[in-house]
Image (cartoon, rainbow, N blue to C red):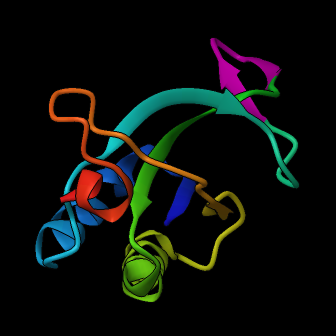
């Protein structure tokens, strides 16, 4: 099992969810509003003639736990839906998951994901 964590632009969330729904490997998602900065180092904005630096940019963080055989398909969907080629598109991180247990039934491993 793998844990996929993707940090994306907020306006790409619906495209990614639509793409994930079109696959048979989509079983659940956790979505969090986050703020941060990467290479972009923030934005300079103007308000009422004054310029100011916004160094933390709003992003959306997606967390998915998927079976090993589904990882390439999910990774491809997230990349294709989130990619614009501009700074700030985000990142995808993939981690190993040791174990998963469905609390309601006690199922473990891959069957806990179904």
**Does residue 88 sit above or below 24 in this rendering?**
above
**Does residue 22 sit above or below 7 in this rendering?**
below
Q: Where the C terminus falls, by quadrant?
A: bottom left
**Residue 18 quadrant:** bottom left
In the drawing, does residue 38 fall left or right of residue 95? right
Whole-percent x, y for residue 68 in the image: 47, 79
Residue 91 visible from this viewpoint: no
Of 39 and 66, nearer the camera is 66
State the residue at coordinates (69%, 25%).
46
In the drawing, does residue 55 fall left or right of residue 89? right
Q: Which stretch appears magenta?
A: 43-53
State the residue at coordinates (16%, 27%).
104
Of 52 and 20, nearer the camera is 20
Q: Is residue 51 magenta?
A: yes
Of 62 and 70, nearer the camera is 70
Q: Main secondary structure of the magenta part?
A: strand
In the drawing, does residue 13 fall left or right of residue 86? left
**Residue 94 quadrant:** bottom right
State the residue at coordinates (52%, 76%).
84
Q: Is residue 37 magenta?
A: no
């Amino acid at each position: 099992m793998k844990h996929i964590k993707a940090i994306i632009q907020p306006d790409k969330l619906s495209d990614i969810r639509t793409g994930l729904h079109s696959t048979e490997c989509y079983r659940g998602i956790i979505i969090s509003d986050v703020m941060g900065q990467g290479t972009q180092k923030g934005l300079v904005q103007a308000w009422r003639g004054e310029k100011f630096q916004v160094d933390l940019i709003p992003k959306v963080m997606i967390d998915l736990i998927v079976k090993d055989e589904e990882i390439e398909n999910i990774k491809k969907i997230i990349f294709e839906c989130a990619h614009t080629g501009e700074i700030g598109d985000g990142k995808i991180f993939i981690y190993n998951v040791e174990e998963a247990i469905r609390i309601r039934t006690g199922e473990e491993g891959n069957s806990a994901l179904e």
